[in-house]
Amino acid sequence: MVDITAPKASLSVEDLKKRITTNLQEKQGVRPEEATVADAYAATAEVVRDYLSVSWMDAKQRMVEGHVKAVGYLSAEFLLGRQLSNALLNAGLTQQFEGAVAELGFKPKDVIETEPEPGLGNGGLGRLAACYVDSLASLGVPAFGYGIQYQYGIFRQEFDDEGKQVERPDYWLSEGNSWGHEDVARSQRVSFGGSVVDGDDGARIWKPAWSVRAVPVDYLVPGYDSGRVNTLRLWTAKSYDEFDLATFNRSDYMGAVIPQVNAENITKVLYPEDSTPQGKRLRLEQQYFFVSASIHDAIRTFYPGEKNPDLTTFPDKICFQLNDTHPVIGIPELMRVLIDENGMDWDTAWTVTRKTFNYTCHTLLPEALEVWPAKLIGELLPRHLEIIRAINAQFVHELESKGTDKDAIDRMRIATDGPDGQVRMAYLATVGGSYVNGVAALHSQLLKDVTLKDFSNAYPDKFTNVTNGVTPRRFIKLANPRLSDLITEGLGTDKWIHDLDELEGLVPLADDASFVERFRKVKDANKQDFAKYASDKFDFTINTSTMFDSMIKRLHEYKRQSLKILAVIAEYAAIKDGSVDADEILPRSVFFGAKAAPGYAMAKLTIQLINNVARVINSDPAVKGKLAVYFPWNYNIDLAEHLIPATELDEQISQAGKEASGTGNMKFALNGSLTVGTLDGANVEIRDRVGAENFFLFGMQVEDVEKLYADGYDPMEFVHADPRLHHAIDLVANGTFSHGDRGTYAALTSDWLTHDYFMTMADFTAYMDIQKEIEATYRKPDEWARKAILNVAHSGFFSSDRSIEDYLKRIWHTEPQR
Ligand code: GFP
């Protein structure tokens, strides 16, 4: 028997090489001399996973036997990025790997880059979840990530000849899955539909109509240098009746697999298009599917073999963090499990449930807070709808007895009645859990003051803040090895990798000429690397002596990619018509990376515009060497890891009061880029820390925005006031970027001129004005580098390790397991 408590011995190059060779022969079935780079990758991944398994088993056993409350991070998205390089780093095997694969005749980089990137998330929310599981393991916290293994992740983005976004399926599992292992033995049954009937003693019995099998696929999450390996358990849906032989024998071959297709549809795609009732239904099925399986899994894990566990202790064993509203159906599910499956009384079940859950809100846009038709929940989860209604009734009663006024009670209802009755998931989460947190100080404040104001008035102690963070392992150490080496040299230690506050030690070096010089060399080399990467991958020709200016994030009107592209157009026009002196022009390369939701027409049109602005500008000899625009398609973690270290100026230009936090802003600051940004989300805290003089602030603040809405916003006023803006819009409207067609961007231009909800027009002039300051600073390279170093030095706060420590203290009330 394996002694799972034995300390793991580190591997030598020789050991690792031997293991890879054996795996090639015995698992991949190839002789090492015949092996392709894909074989080498598959073999290495298996070897590393096997190596981590010992610590993994140990961590699981200690989690169950120990007395430290665990954390279950429930998230519909985990945007992991490639696994191999991260696993090697965290397990302390990077050098051995490089030596071993080199001896086998491969370039380490090629092996690493063979891995397909799992796109199991959309943007910041999913990437945050991935940073958090890394930090939980690195800090030694017993934890599970729970989510969904989508067969097709976020679509693969392509651009057609007209510059339009085309969505292609992402076959990320087509070459197998080296990191996720199915554990069929730990499957869970998840049921849907049917009806609820009366049982004995007033009990209610749910008689579901159909069930699927939730099969866990386990990913190992090694902590950095912590020895702890946690579990990320992603569920995949399978049918109990894979195949109907009788139907097949009647020659109805398609009909024979219908149950299988129906079941597997649940985990087929990330974010099914939900503009149709079927799409909505599928999303709710996904959400319930993964939280139900996860709750049962946690009970099985913490009460092994117990037939009638005492679940009043459940909140001492694990607490669940609801990552946005997607997993909130877990609240009525736990109530149902406690009452219907375990015979607990309502009040005790409610106490246990409230203690178990906490909710993180990631938005300020009311439309992003999920609301489900009560009818749909009733059809799919009839017992849950009853429980939600009972929670609502109890809540209303509680508010009445507190003396809350009637209007406020009406606004706060979790479930509304009538044929169009709705269930508001954010409200359910707020009432059914212990804490609600926003993801940056300003965001948490606005949640209290605006979005969830009534709730914060009634339950002020529930509300707290945890400012987001990013893992320094992936986003500095792996993505930016040159800067990592320089930091380690400068500080004389690499402790910063797990204690990012150490970066403060770089402050004096911002005034050390030789350090500044080396810092600049690092950035230049990263720019060269990016240009090479972009040439190989996208066939771009990038002039590396220009300023690298990047805006990478989901495409959304509130994030205001439109503001950036209008400013680019204005600059282009100014260069062309000579209104700016040749020696005043600061050569720039502007990079965009963004996917638009497939059903979001305005966002897709913005992509088309950016691509066509790039086409026109990049082929115009009049601006050659002065201005260029690049839009690498299919923005993903890999692209971010290459572009962020090379960027000098990053754009965080959302309308104030709309971006909950942002995490790209943190990654850029930590990689020595200067930010141009509004006072929004975590920009506020970044600026406070790095110093106002090291951040290019512009634009309206939250109060200005509110006032302008209240006074009646007319974008035309701003368009008339700034001829540069007027002209830029004219160029969009007159066909300059659409081969002369005036209709192509009509929806965009008309929105800008008549509606412009996110006030792009109102911030345009301020945005253009701040460019002068940016350019003047950039012309003093040492000054720019000094500011960039101070950004790095003062951004240690934005480590996801710190965020997790805040969650431990403020919300989870648990600790690492030593
Ligand atoms: C959302 C919010 C961001 C926030 C992340 C993580 O991200 O402001 O930083 O969640 O909390 F909008 P996106 O998916 O929109 O990028």
Image (cartoon, grey):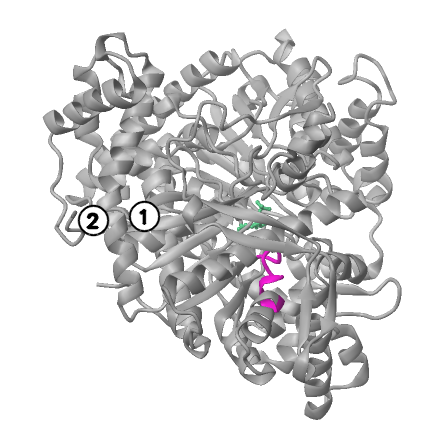
Of marks 1 and 2, the one in the foreground: 2
Camera sees residue 670? yes
What label does residue 793 carry, if any?
A: 1
Identify the residue at horizontal 22%, vertical 38% (top origin): 51
Of residues 237 and 197, the one drawn nearer to the viewer in this rendering: 197
- Which amino acid is tagged 2? Lys
Task: State which quadrant residue 202 falls in.
Answer: bottom right
Of residues 460 and 397, the one drawn nearer to the viewer in this rendering: 397
Of residues 335 and 428, the one drawn nearer to the viewer in this rendering: 335
Residue 221 vs residue 725: left or right? left
Q: Which residues are magenta?
A: 324-332
Q: Is residue 304 magenta?
A: no
Q: Which residue is mark 2?
A: 495
Residue 189 vs residue 514: left or right? right
In the rendered image, residue 52, in percent from the top left (x then y), is placed at 25, 42
Query: In the image, is residue 630 above or below residue 209?
Result: above
Q: Is residue 328 magenta?
A: yes
Which mark sits nearer the N-terminus, 1 or 2? 2
In the rendered image, residue 618, in percent from the top left (x then y), is placed at 61, 13
In the rendered image, residue 331, in percent from the top left (x then y), is placed at 59, 67
Residue 809 vs residue 258: left or right? left
Task: State which quadrant residue 28 falls in.
Answer: top left
Query: In the image, is residue 556 above or below residue 137?
Result: above
